[in-house]
Image: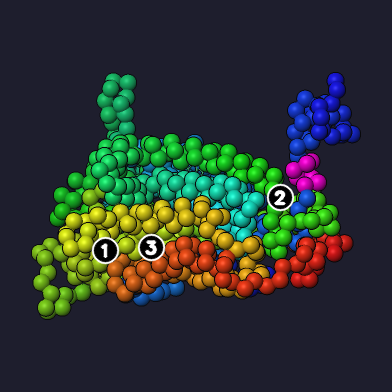
Amino acid sequence: MKKKLIGFMVAAALCLGGAAHAEEGGKLAHQYWPERGVFGKYDMASVQRGFQVYREVCSNCHSLKLMSYRDLKGLGYTDAQVKAVASAYTVQDGPNDEGEMFDRPARPSDRFHSPFANDKAARAANGGALPPDMSLLANARPGGPDYIYGILTGYGTAPADVKMTPGLYWNDTFPGHQIAMPQPLSDGQVTYSNGDAASTQQAARDVAQFLDWASNPHMEARKAMGIKVILFMLFFVGIMRAAKRKVWADVH
Amino acid sequence: MSRPANTQKFDNCLIQWIDERLPIFTMLTKEYGVFPMPKNANYLWSFGGIALTMLIIMIVTGVFLAMNYTPNTALAFDSVQRTMRDVNYGWLLRYVHMNGASFFFIAVYIHIFRGLYYGSYKSPRELLWIVGVVILILMMATAFMGYALPWSQMSGWGATVITSLFSAIPVIGDGLVTWLWGGFSVANPTLNRFFSLHFLLPFVILGVVFIHVWALHVTGSNNPTGVEPKSEKDTLPFHPYFTVKDSYALVTFMTIFLSVVFFAPLALTEPDHFKHFNPMQTPPEIVPEWYFLPFYAILRSFTHDIYIPFTDIIILPAKLQGVMGMFGSLLLLMVLPWLDTSKVKSARYRPVYKWCLLLLLVSLCVLGYVGSQPAGGSLAVVGQVATAYYFLHFIVLVPVLGFVEKTCPVPASISDDPCCKH
Ligand code: HEM
């Protein structure tokens, strides 16, 4: 009886879990992302290249408001490197003792520089469309990095029977297939530090991983801690099981 | 000083000194030391303690989250993200709190099903059961308001959909909704009151749990036979037998919970929960948290207005029926002790009721699935059938079975029960 009952419970849990997971099926091609497995880790070299792609291309339109420059240390950059990255940007500070606002180079503790002063300015520069902030983009779209990769590599010519709205581009992945973002990546557009010119696919993959990292910067710390916690818990479960058996040994 | 009546003697003189003035140690010994537990209580009896532990975990993590949270529509979303990114172990706090809500509901749902299966709601435990249903309703309100706090698309739209339900109430509905919102839409006043209530209600729950446990310690625990303990042979002292058994169950549950927290903390989170709330842009699907899905499906199962016959005057609009159905499905649990007419408590000895209960569980799972899917289509009919079974079960089957079911022989006492020899 007990077994049957536990069976019911498990069935119920699975049922509900399955229900909560259900999502509308996109036509995304699924790739392997090293960070997405239960024990997965980021491919840091790829994430670093992805940061370069973001900095050189995407940051012209997309903000990353929730990130500070110092967070880049999580990518393996040194303090000096982070400082160098930050100081390339100018931020407004103030008011100073004279009551004036002034510009200064960004510091590691500053948030990432946003390309536009506000959403209205961003829309005005992009034909009315708003380039979404990227801090949580990989979590905020079904498919995560697959979706981002799909958008970046999904440009093409519209089927003959589709009437394109002026100013929009055909994209296989974007819901509705008409996107306001002009194709941001092309072959050879970004040259990596080892001298290789990245293909569109390579750059798309790298930036998708960078954005996955930007959405979940503590993932590796979390999993590393998790392994220790779970090992401890399993040990604890073993002890409690032994204690329970010992205490109950004489009960009839 | 003379010892008050009904207190105990302790060896430790400090404990003795305190106990004479405030008999808390006498109380603890009585309620958690020598308290007699039916010796055949199985692991399903551990889920009450597990649920209480989850409540405490929610309160502790919640208090720390609240230190970093800003209840303002312009700042709330970013303040939660700041907690995740910049506060030391903030991600851990939030993931424990987020997933803790789910595991709290898992524990409570198992706890309730245990009650349904073994007839724990029947005399003399009716009040205990009713207080339990009150806890469930308070938990739902708390979780609903907590989900609004991160001010995501799901937060804002979930809050909008659920609060709008009250507009179905005739005459006062629209005014009531405006009053709940503190304005003409879900906005800053709504967020502020939700935060205030979300902070308050868990402590109210804690108080109601106290009453729940108090009532439990008057009647004592039920057990898988549903036969009340008759002699000392039927029981064991709570300590050490059930302290150790419950701890084993608790640690096992926590291991599963922590595995999710550390390795799949976002498994149950909708992508739209990562987007800032935008009142101008409805998400394609507004999906509640999994623990609300069966009730959400019941709400959506009512699709036909009821007219006065031969006229086109609507007396019961579909929306109002849905709201009544959803709240009714919970309130029905409160009167269950009087709906059940069977003399036998435990489903173990009730061959027909047992299968009806299984079917109820299946229909709840089906409702959960239907609730997660877009409304309409052929699934709507499936949802309606499952909803119909839910009400049929409690309103018709449970009362009728008590009269017509041929039950199996019930053991004279717990010790006489052949199948629970440990
Ligand atoms: C019955 C116990 C409780 C339940 C079921 C509960 C449930 C929830 C849920 C479902 C969320 C949304 C999580 C998310 O999606 O981000 C939440 C958020 C929150 N809760 Fe609670 N909670 C409880 C107790 C508390 C207490 C006692 C406090 C404060 C003293 C608290 C403070 C907060 C805060 C500040 C947030 C927003 C931050 C966040 O979303 O992570 N909670 N709660």
> Does B292 sit left or right of B209 as displayed?
left
Q: Residues within 10 Å of mark 1 (few under 14, many from 20)?
A: few
* Residue that extends furthest to the right in the rendered view of this protein: B11
Q: Quadrant of the N terminus of chain A?
A: bottom right
- Ligand 1 within 8 Å of disc 3? The answer is no
Residue range highlighted in magenta:
B29-35
Q: Residue tagged by mark 2?
A: B220
Chain letter of mark 3 equals B
Residue appearing at x 16%, y 60% in the figure: B311
Q: Which mark is residue A252?
A: none
Spatial distance from mark 2 to mark 1, Cα to Cα?
46 Å
Same chain? Circles 3 and 1: yes
Q: Amino acid at mark 3?
A: Ala
Q: Residue tagged by mark 3?
A: B297
Spatial distance from mark 3 to mark 1, Cα to Cα?
15 Å
Q: Secondary structure at mark 3?
A: helix
Q: Amino acid at mark 2?
A: Gly
Of marks 3 and 1, which one's residue comes earlier in the chain? 3
